Image: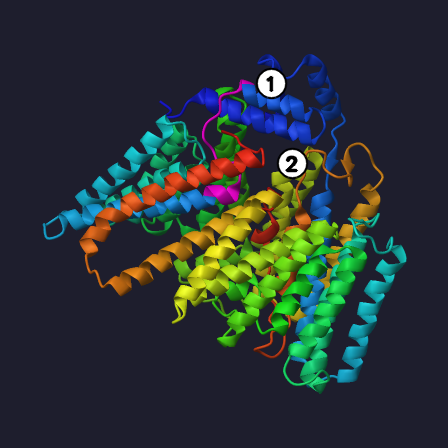
Amino acid sequence: MKHKEWLAKRLVERHLINEDQFSKIQIYRERRIFSLRSELLFLMYGGVLAFTTGAGMVIYNNIDAIGHIALLAILLCLIIGCYFLAFRKAKGFSKTESEFDNPVYDYLVLAGSLLTVVFFSYLQTRFNALGDGYNGAALASAIVAFGAAYYFDNRSSYAIGITSLAAFVGITATPEAVVRNEMYTHPAQTYAGLGLAIALAFWYEYCRKTRFKVHFNSVSVHFALHLTGIVCLKGLFEDLWPAFACILAAATYYFYLKSYETGSTTLFVFVMLYAYFGLNIFGGRFWELLDFPLLEFLAFVSPLYILASIYFFIKLTRNFNHNINDGEE
Amino acid sequence: MTAKNKELIENLLLLREAKRLQLANFLTVDDIHRIKAQLPLPRTSSKLLVRLGFFFLGCTLLSSILGAVSVLLLGNEVNPTALLLVFAAIAITCAEILSHNDFHNFGLDDAFVLSFQILLAGAVFVTTESPTLVFFMLWIVGLACSYRYFNTASMFLSLMGISSFIASVITVHKLLHPMVLPFLMLLAAAMMYYGYVRLNALEPIRLYRGSMRMLKGFALVLGYLSVNYLIVRNLSEEMMKIVIQPGEDIPLAFIFYVTTFLIPAFYITYGVLKRDKIFILTGIAALAFSFISIRVYYHLLPLESALIFGGIALFAGGYYAMTKLRDKTSGLTFLADRYRDDDRSLTEAIVASSTLTPNTSQAGEDPMDFGGGTFSGGGSSSNY
């Protein structure tokens, strides 16, 4: 007997579901329906990513070898092809969620957006067509990606738009860059990052109020949180750390409220993570100021401190789960 | 001999199944509320991310306690084995306390159970300096912990223990010719799978759902890797000190070329026929790894062309299968999975944004490699 069948049987035996419900489940099981939807979509998604990465590499490797105009023309044709095919099937712009009948078109839009980024980067590398540096190229990619995202209702494109926008202000907002601590190098970019985060938060609030593409909101609010969190944690190691501590405290409060509002556990966990790391770094800096070199004291107090924080986190999590009605306690 | 209340664990499994049935519209939301009210439940973290957070906190707590103990002992002559054993005892005590307070898969309990095994392994290694014994110990203790605490990660440690034990007996202690190792591992994998099939039919084992799935998945992965060409070639170069000249190959190379592709193909076919997702997913991942393995030695195509053509082939294959299955309403189908409410597109959005972004500080693209880990399980993506 399969595990699921056993569970269904137990549910009946313990009178948690009635015979009628049980027989419906059994009848459905006998049809042996097996959805390969996510696997096949995943294959197509992998195909799009592999193809665009390959295209990016061809261009990167042959940047001086083949005719630039020819390459650019091929890219442009591909982009137009992707968008055109999707455009023919699109239901047109809508303020709410709208899906293609066939999910394959979502991936065409994604391919188009990724290739657009390749196209503009290449155009910039070769011809400096959009001013000095890469900011122009990033902005252009962002505009096209946002356009595609809103018209075709494509969240992947929306995320590409935000990363391009971050690149425009000089921040590499990819998980990889975060891990390598290579998000930005120039101190001024700290403020650019904060500015972008605040702008995203405002955009989030605006969309929520006007019910405009509400399902994009989780992307906006996540990017806003991660930008603020990382900028603030970095800032806590700099001279102006008290200011960043205040910003982080305010941001924690704001995003904590947002996690309740959206009911997103991921958001909640990351808010807690940034706040807790921030608090500990803040404590460390404070300790430095006090010039209080009692390491042994610290060794005995820290288990109690961590125990207290665990207690506190359990309370907070229980509250949160209760609020989004997902408690399994 | 289990440390946790079995009834609570069964209740949790039942509630999760009921929630799944509710997603599939067999039950109503009211049913779920009624069932939840009837079932006493353990303290658990239903979301993986929350569990990871508490796991991290548990590890921090344990290391701070161990730090405090070390400070206490500062200045005294301490036997390192004894110290590690004391640490392990502290970890297991914490795990017991949590288990008796009905913590189950909460994150904190996982941290202590795993730390206990690692500290114990450390103690064994410090005393005997024999990796073989450490692996043997991990195997036995892992099994015991997975039984006593219903802990899936301990099952993983145990399975790693037994496979490393076999490998170590052959390579370090030279019990058999190293060429036997791939086939011995394949046999071990087959026995694990057989064990899974036999155990899974037993009523009391039903509660060990996580450990059983781990056993099955591990058997499949081990079975594939043990006869994968890349792995076998690397290991034989290392262990038998074979230097392979251009034009030569490892002994029995032909067999390994065949198995490298035959096993993933078998997994996928079997998975589709038997409606088994673990087989399908392992098969897809294994097939991808097979192509990478062969590419390491035979550059049939430059990487970028391989990516472009591979991408087109994947897309076309997926599209073809989709058109075939699209309108079917029984058997294999492309209809949305009735039992799932996952939000794939957010994960996809995040991965997509990290593959190609204009990088303002460097020239050109920086294509990030997209390892299967990001979007395989679907466990972390279902939080929205």
Q: CA distance from mark 1 to mark 2?
A: 23 Å
Residue B57: x and y, percent?
38, 45
Report the mark closest to the observer, 1 or 2: 1
Chain under callout 2? B
The amino acid type, in three-letter code, at marker 1 is Leu
**Residue sitting farthest toward the left:** B76
Q: B74 above or below A324?
A: below
- State which quarter of the image contains the N terminus of chain A: top right
Classify mark 2: helix, strand or loop.
Answer: loop
At x 61%, y 66%, the residue is B298
At x 60%, y 18%, the residue is A11
Q: For the magenta stretch, what is the residue range?
A: B38-51
Classify mark 1: helix, strand or loop.
Answer: helix
Residue A310: x and y, percent?
38, 41
Q: Quadrant of residue B343?
A: top right
Mark 2 surroundings within 10 Å by alpha-carbon count, few (fewer than 14), some (14 through 19), many (20 or more): some
Main SS of residues in magenta: loop
In the rendered image, which residue does mark 1 sit on?
A: A11
Q: Quadrant of residue B379?
A: top right
Relative placement, left or right, of B325 versus B291 is right
Relative placement, left or right, of B313 versus B284 is right
Q: Quadrant of residue A46?
A: bottom right
At x 82%, y 49%, the residue is A102
Residue A320: x and y, percent?
52, 39
In the rendered image, which residue does mark 2 sit on?
A: B276
